[in-house]
Amino acid sequence: SPWQNPRDPLDVNDDGEITPLDILLIINQLNQHGSHQLPNLPSNGLGEPPAIRPDTSGDGFLSPLDALLIINALNRYRGEGEAAAVEAEGAAEPTQVDWQSAEEERRRQVRIDRELESLLDQLALERPSA
């Protein structure tokens, strides 16, 4: 799909990182236009590439699945980061690099948690009342 980032399908804004912002970009599109098939782009290579590439699943549709794939990846990464931190803490003679890596990972996870919490708060405010 031309709407999928060829370097990293989960990096919607192509900034080199998978973050809650990528989820927010998809959710904003879903709130504005709902789930839908993404339009075809010219195949002659003359057109500008899309500013964001929200088709993380590569199926040619914008749907909640595209956001869910990023959420799952962030959650998986978070679990792997916690395991690495525990391994670093449990090492017989941890090196300074191990401790620094574990601390950097902990800080990254705190930042991701805050961004996800903020995203969920924004979604709760944008949801129409019944």
Image (tube, rainbow, N blue to C red):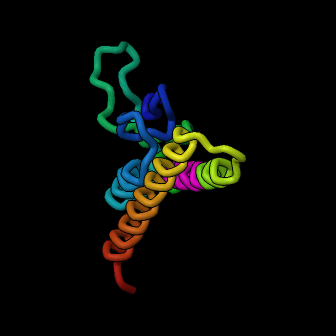
Horizontal side of 71 relative to 39 (left or right) equals right
Q: Which residues are magenta?
A: 66-78
Horizontal side of 69 relative to 116 (left or right) equals right
Q: Quarter-wise, where is residue 47 in the image? A: top left
Q: Is residue 84 above or below residue 47?
A: below
Q: Is residue 110 above or below residue 49?
A: below
Q: Is residue 4 above or below residue 33?
A: above
Q: How many labels were placed on the picture? A: 0
The answer to which of 126 and 18 lies nearer the viewer is 18
Horizontal side of 72 relative to 120 (left or right) equals right
Residue 79 counted in the magenta span: no
Which residue is rendered at x = 37% and y = 13% of the image?
44
Horizontal side of 51 relative to 61 (left or right) equals left
Residue 98 location, x and y as percent? 57, 42
The overriding secondary structure of the stretch rendered in magenta is: helix
Which residue is rendered at x = 37% and y = 51% of the image?
21
Residue 34 location, x and y as percent? 41, 58
The answer to which of 47 and 13 lies nearer the viewer is 13
Residue 51 location, x and y as percent? 29, 35
Which residue is rendered at x = 35% and y = 39% of the image?
13
